[in-house]
Image (tube, rainbow, N blue to C red):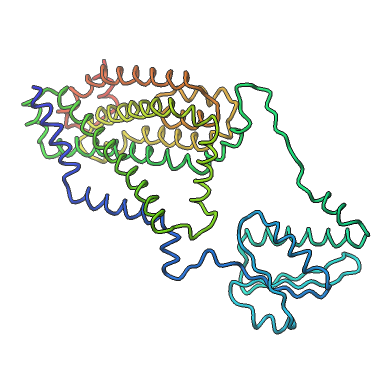
Amino acid sequence: MRNKFLYLIKVSLKRKIDTKWFRIANILIALVIIGTANIDSIINYFGGDFNKPQKIYIIDNTNSSYDIFKQQIDMNESNKEYKLIKYKKTEKELKKDLKNKDIAIVFNNDNEKVLKVKLLSQKYLDILDSQFLKNALYNTKIMLSIEKSNISFEEINSIYEQVDVERVVFDKSKSSSNENLEIIMQTVFPLVILPFFMLVVILVQMIGAEVNDEKTTRGMEIIISNVSPKVHFFSKVIASNIFVIFQGLLLFMYGVAGFISRKFIGGDQIKYGVFDTVKETLKGAINTSFADKLIYMIPLLLILMILTFLAYSLLAGILASMTTTIEDFQQLQTPIMIILFIGYYLAVMAVMFKGSLFITGLSFVPFISAILAPSLFMIDQIGVYHVIGSIVIMIFTNYLLIKYGLRVYKVGILNYSSDKLWSKMWKALK
């Protein structure tokens, strides 16, 4: 019986991995991931130039605004480079010389409002450029107003000097250095839970399709005549989980390959873009006590995810046994997808529910705990004991699925009727 069990696992894995579809799909996925990691280099190769400074032509009819505005530009914290050019010609000539991406600013005196400004461009401005320039122009106007009020340069500097803030957190269990870790939820975390979410969807669809394919071709009768429904059930579950874990490792390797290739290609064409944001966020997390917690939390979270994979595969196998076509299975799997989507969106929006007992309680709910627990742990909503509790609950859930699910599977696997699916399942449980 053991040899038959291993043989079924081998055949099931071969049907999933040893196919042209699997190879082509993974080649495309690898190209997409590596290409996305190096998207700035690719665009730059075809003519994009992300590091070219933004040209700003200045016509200063006030004879005092240019230097002050330049000081504001030099104080730029957005890390985008701007190149100021003092334009000597008229505004009419400027319109002819202004290129597509160039910006022009005309300063004029105003007796009532101190300063009047024209912001010129051929096309719409980027929202970051627009916001930054408007702030710089606003500060320029204030500086001119202060100068006209005969305030000394030292006093002006003291007005605009950044305030020193000493952060004190009274809760000794909290660290002020970890206060901004919520940024991880917006940058790094979606990159972690999205693959898990997609793998669960693939897992559920794959088991349903395989079981229904065997029932449609009547191959199920031949298999069950040689092995018990129990052996068949577990072979499907184990083979599907091995495949999903293998696919997850491949996705991780593609991601690593993307960042390694980015390093060798020199893919820092977009300064302070999304990749730099992720990198800086991770560096900040590593330099805090949060990194120490990850050392023992990552293994626990991986265990929770594997147990959740197992639970979804058990449930998918049970539901698939009661159907005869993939269309019927789509109906039965709808509740699974709804639960999965709820867990995903709760995890993404977990920061909004910080401090709520409701969201903490949901971290113990089977099927969504593996998605929700990591996000709640990152924002210090739950601790290690909560994760261990979720693991225990998932183990118990899998036990119930195996104990009662086998009853449904044994009855449904050779049942080819598609009428009253939920009624059949309830009778099988009884």
| Outermost residue toward the front in this view | 154
Q: Which sits in the foreground, 253 or 332? A: 253
Q: Which sits in the foreground, 174 or 202? A: 174
The quarter of the picture where residue 219 lies is: top left
| Outermost residue toward the right in this view | 150
Above or below 247: residue 87: below
Name the side, left or right, on which 98 lies relative to 195. Answer: right
Q: Residue at the spot x=43%, y=18% of the render?
A: 389
Above or below 245: residue 254: below
Name the side, left or right, on which 63 lies relative to 168. Answer: right
The quarter of the picture where residue 121 lies is: bottom right
- Please state the total of marks drawn on the protein image: 0
Pick the quarter of the image with the N terminus: top left
Pick the quarter of the image with the C terminus: top left
Q: Residue at the spot x=34%, y=36% of the render?
A: 200
Name the side, left or right, on which 289 lies relative to 121. Answer: left
Name the side, left or right, on which 278 lies relative to 265. Answer: right
Residue 415 percent across, percent down from the top left: 17, 28
Residue 98 percent across, percent down from the top left: 64, 78
Q: Residue at the spot x=43%, y=23% of the render?
A: 365
Above or below 227: residue 17: below
Q: Residue at the spot x=51%, y=50% of the render?
A: 276
Residue 184 percent across, percent down from the top left: 52, 39
Q: Which sits in the foreground, 296 or 379? A: 296
| Outermost residue toward the top in this view | 430
Residue 411 percent across, percent down from the top left: 18, 23
